[in-house]
Image: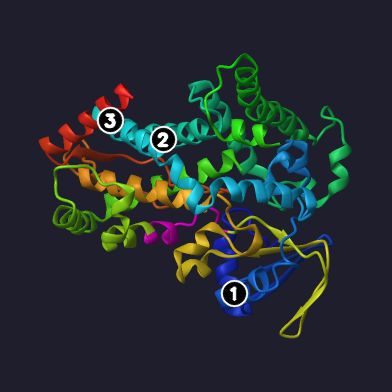
Amino acid sequence: MADMPEKKAWVTYAEWGKTYGDIMHLRVFGQHTIILNSIEVVKDLIEKRSHIYSDRPSVPMIDLMEWDFNAGHKPYNSVWKVHRRLFDQTFKPSASVKYRPIQTRKINDLLYGLLTSPEDFGNHCRTHHHVCCLRIRYHTQGDYFVTLAEAAILKLSEFALPGGNAVNTFTILRFLPAWFPGAGFKRFANEAKKLTRQMRDVPFEFVKKGMADGTAQECIVTELLTKSDEAQSAEDTVSAIGTFFFAMAMCPEVQIKARQEIDAVIGTGRLVTYEDRDVLPYIEAIYREVMRWKPITPLGVPRCTSEEDVYNGYYIPKGHTHVLHATKILADDDIYAFGFGRRNCAGRYMASSTIWLTIATVLSTFKIEKKNDPAGHYIPLDGQYTDGLICHPPPFQCSITPRSEEATRLILEAVDKKASL
């Protein structure tokens, strides 16, 4: 118990892997955890035996905060399969194309925010990507809904991992009343539950009301309701874009090469579009490195085995085993930033295209540099990312300026065109 890491467990697990190998077994108060430390093992188990390794362990804090509605936290059963099938139909590559105009308009909004108030780039990134997801799902983009989503996800991230709170290990504690000494987790969960319900129900009821009175605009909810994941995915995108700005502030030489490629292939007379992706290999390389360098969910979302298994002589028991994968396996390919096997990210195609176009358009229009203090010295950048289910770069300052008058003109023109739609 004393050896278990309290923070940034993935760092410790990766170090342990150097000593104990690619598969490690931990047991804390009867709770079993399997750590997978190599891409080969993850492929063999999570992908090739995905029918066994696609379940989710029971995490009481998720239930207490009422995040169990989210398909990403549901057990591997018939209900999850229905959710996943609907999500795949909506966000498969061919279906995702129809959302590109919305994504483009919201990216243009981000560019305008960076142009008018660059010092607030962190808020611009958060608001932009949450609004984009809300607009696609519910055809709404109010600040109130954005605030709800951010607050609910923050609560989830703090205690969603199996060891994130004592109640996740000693499950009987979930029955303690909120007033009981030491039951602070219950009070926390009750507060989080209110946010979760509002985030889940308010925009949904907004769309249903619009459908009833004939004012609803086309969106994912209207499409699914007519025919018959979610807020967390937006937060993943926010983290990736934050990493991009952090990396570019540290590596100005990368921006120079990126702009040279864009200028040579696209020119300076228009903004980059989705259709340009195949002809901008260096921009693609930047995107892939952003996804690999600082993983959004360093341990992944825990799995558990639905059957007992034997692998390379190791016995892996059924049910209560938490299967996690450490950060180091991402050294192979950016695709694994979106997960493995049957429970990989269903919205990965849309997330990938949004992150890529954001990176490409920002690089084509802005210079990102370290910021100077009043004495003219660079303000150092702290590379210590936050802890939790979803990790973000620490708050940092950087200088964001337009590349040229032509870049400014393109941004203003794009916003004007958006306003006329």
Count up the numbered dots. Answer: 3
Q: Nearer the viewer, residue 311 or 17?
A: 311
- The label shown at residue 102 is 2
- The label shown at residue 112 is 3
Q: What stretch is highlighted in magenta?
A: 288-298
| Left or right for 207, reference 113 | right
**Sequence order check, earlier mark of 2 and 3:** 2
Indicate the amino acid at tag 3. Answer: Tyr
Please tell me how crowded label 1 is: few (under 14), some (14-19), or many (20+) other residues with Cα within 10 Å. some
Please tell me how crowded label 2 is: few (under 14), some (14-19), or many (20+) other residues with Cα within 10 Å. some
Residue at screen point 27% across, 45% down: 361
Task: Give the alpha-carbon distance from disc 1 to disc 3, as whole Å.
Answer: 46 Å
Instruction: State the residue lying farthest toward the bottom.
Output: 313
Reading the image, the residue beneath label 1 is 17
The quarter of the picture where residue 312 lies is bottom right
Contact (Cβ within 8 Å) of mark 1 with mark 3: no
Task: Give the alpha-carbon distance from disc 2 to disc 1, as whole Å.
Answer: 44 Å
